[in-house]
Image (cartoon, rainbow, N blue to C red):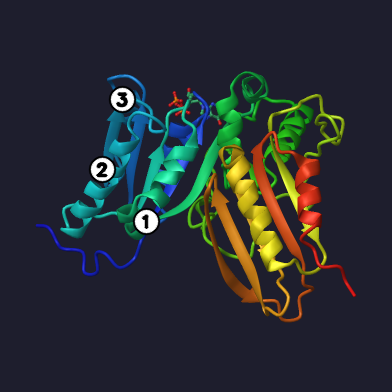
Amino acid sequence: MQHPNPNPSSVPIPVTVLTGFLGAGKTTLLNRILTTAHGHRIAVIENEFGPVNIDSELLVQQSAEVVEMTNGCLCCTVRGDLAKNLVDLKARRDTGELAFDRIVIETTGLADPGPVIQTFFAEPELADAYLLDAVLTVVDAIHAPRQLDEHAVLLKQIGFADRLLVSKSEGVAADALEALRDRLARINARAPIRQLVAGELDVGFLLDIRGFNLNENLLAEDAPATPRFRMAAKGGSRVVGGSAHNDEIGSLLLEHAGDVDLDRIGAFVQGLLDRRGDDLLRYKGVLAIPGQPNRLVFQGVHRLAGFDYGAEWDDAARRSRIVVIGRRLPADELRAGFAECVIAAL
Ligand SMILES: Nc1nc2c(ncn2[C@@H]2O[C@H](COP(=O)(O)OP(=O)(O)OP(=O)(O)O)[C@@H](O)[C@H]2O)c(=O)[nH]1
């Protein structure tokens, strides 16, 4: 017998996007999530190239529902289908046909997570029904160093991430692992990095992250304490720390120990979105505005940005910080533009 959900529409359903390059270990991780006793009822959307969805056959059938999306990649041809599937899942949940309280979408290894993320903000029906919780990116410790050099989409998968999960690290030498962690932190200074260890799963690290909410945590709580940002020198770019890699996606922190002018920073951010929106993966700012006791928080993906006033500064030292993760960031230009917005201490 089907029991209608007592309050079907009021609470948005959290959605996790699980991404990572081909063979990184996405399905392996998803299976572990599905078989761990955490009390969450999870519906799964599986996307795979080709007419037959092998991944869904590899999945343990522990979830409320597995929706297979084949013959195309979520980030391009079947994006409309994703929206339809999400609307359909919600309707079936509302009637009591399905019982689940969150969704995990496993993308193909070749998917750019950007369009998948944008779907949740661009479709009004989805924006009300669903809450995009986080992007989890699995990184293959053995193959990632080479894949990063050869496949730009992996850089995007890392750049969009709220969590970076390193698989297959058992057989990798400690110094190689450290080099990979350094490289990941330069590409995405926001996301904490953890190794996946067989038999261990910290569900609290993976679910209910609220990576897309407007809150004052500029860097995820256990992101590297001193994020290593990629710096660009005049006439080109270079990586501080002597790394041989010059990945085209990197992170930049703009920081001022005080307030910024609201009009100027608004124009600065708008100009950045207008000119470089396609190259911006994720960005987030927490700003102190003169005369305003609350933090101004904004964040976005490409050109989709939201802002709001958050918690009060109270006794905390007022400061203004913006983290940008993007492709070929013109660091000097951005620093100069930001510098024009700051209000010098008296
Ligand atoms: N040694 C080791 N092998 C792993 C680990 N995680 C996954 N694998 C293996 O890597 C292979 C690929 O894992 P999958 O989970 O299918 O990877 P995927 O990212 O879902 O792959 P695609 O859907 O094809 O892109 C399988 O043989 C897994 O058993 C790990 O942490 N250590």
- Residue position marked by numbered label 1 in the rendering: 127
- Asked whether residue 103 is in view, the answer is yes
Q: Which residue sits at x=60%, y=37%?
A: 279
Q: Are marks 2 and 1 in contact (CB under 8 Å)?
A: no
Relative to 111, 342 lies left or right: right
Q: Which residue is mark 2?
A: 84
Q: Disc 1 or 3, which lies upstream in sequence?
A: 3
Q: In the image, what residue occupies the spot 28% across and 37% down?
A: 81
Residue at 58% over, 65% down: 215
Q: Residue 185's spot in the image, x, y percent?
A: 71, 40
Query: Of discs 3 and 2, which sits in the foreground?
Result: 2
The residue at label 2 has a CB less than 8 Å from ligand 1 = no
Image quadrant assignment for residue 316: bottom right
Q: Earlier in the sequence, mark 3 or mark 2?
A: 3
Q: Nearer the viewer, residue 21 or 287?
A: 287
Q: Earlier in the sequence, mark 2 or mark 1?
A: 2
Q: Nearer the viewer, residue 4 or 74?
A: 74
